Amino acid sequence: MPYARSRRLIELLAIDQPWVGELFVRRARKRNGHARDEAHWDQLYAEGEYDRLWRNDQRYHQRLLASLISARRPHPALLDIGCGEGAFYDSLRQHAPSSYLGVDISNRAIERAKARFGDAAAPGPVRFEQGDAARFAVTETFDAIVFSECVEYFDDIESVVAHYRRSLRPGGIIGLTSWLAVRQLRIWRKLKTIATVEDESVVFSQWGGAWIVAVLSPK
């Protein structure tokens, strides 16, 4: 417990003092994003790795983000990148989105999302599609685009945001949740250079987990 508390203090300090985080991240193993292909994610979902995301204490941050987005863009048309089995949509649907499209690289996750929400009543169209989240091609436009706990898996987050920015309607926003860790804070600082932060919060669970939750407007 003392270690967990000290680590959380370091992460909170690193939000506003980047040099603090850099002291602890330099020796960390570099993430190999290219190795994480469809088969990798299908296996994790098959093994139940992400069943925990449906627990109440794992969903506070998603509920907050859904509320923040809906406050700025009521009944949004929303694109959810890295949607998994639809955990964020389950929070968003309480706010009656006018349309929803969830995209994930894992076909197993997409099939589970379709099975879970396929017969659920919705005010607008709801779709789940399998594809590469870094460059998925869409033809429609959206009020909001969400990256929930997935930005750390992109090799070049600036290029990913630029790819999807063209699909945002005027005044459209980007929603983000990210595990609070010094490595992810590097990505968070990159995002702040290409977007204006409209809302920002840190959400804690009773077991010690914490997430950054933010709404941004692309510059």
Image (tube, grey):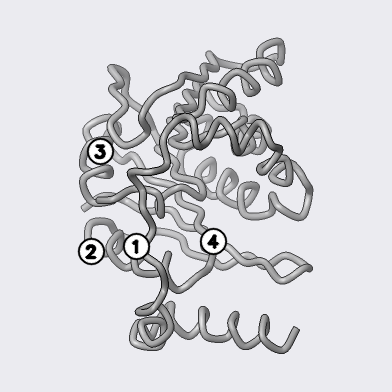
* CB-based contact (under 8 Å), mark 3 and mark 1: no
Q: Pointer 3: residues within 10 angstroms few (<14), some, or many (20+)?
A: many
Q: Pointer 2: residues within 10 angstroms few (<14), some, or many (20+)?
A: few
* CB-based contact (under 8 Å), mark 1 and mark 2: no
- The residue that mark 1 highlights is 187
Query: Residue visible at 36% across and 82% down?
Result: 22
**Front-most of residues 27 and 196:** 27
Q: As shown in the figure, which amino acid type bears the numbered disc 1?
A: Ile
| Of callouts 4 and 3, the N-terminal one | 3
How far apart are the alpha carbons under marks 4 and 3?
A: 23 Å
- The residue that mark 4 highlights is 179
* CB-based contact (under 8 Å), mark 4 and mark 1: no
Mark 1 or mark 2, which is nearer to you?
1
- The residue that mark 3 highlights is 165
How far apart are the alpha carbons under marks 1 and 2?
A: 10 Å
Query: Residue visible at 71% across and 20% down?
Result: 116
Residue 180 spot, x, y in % from top left: 53, 67
Residue 62 spot, x, y in % from top left: 61, 48
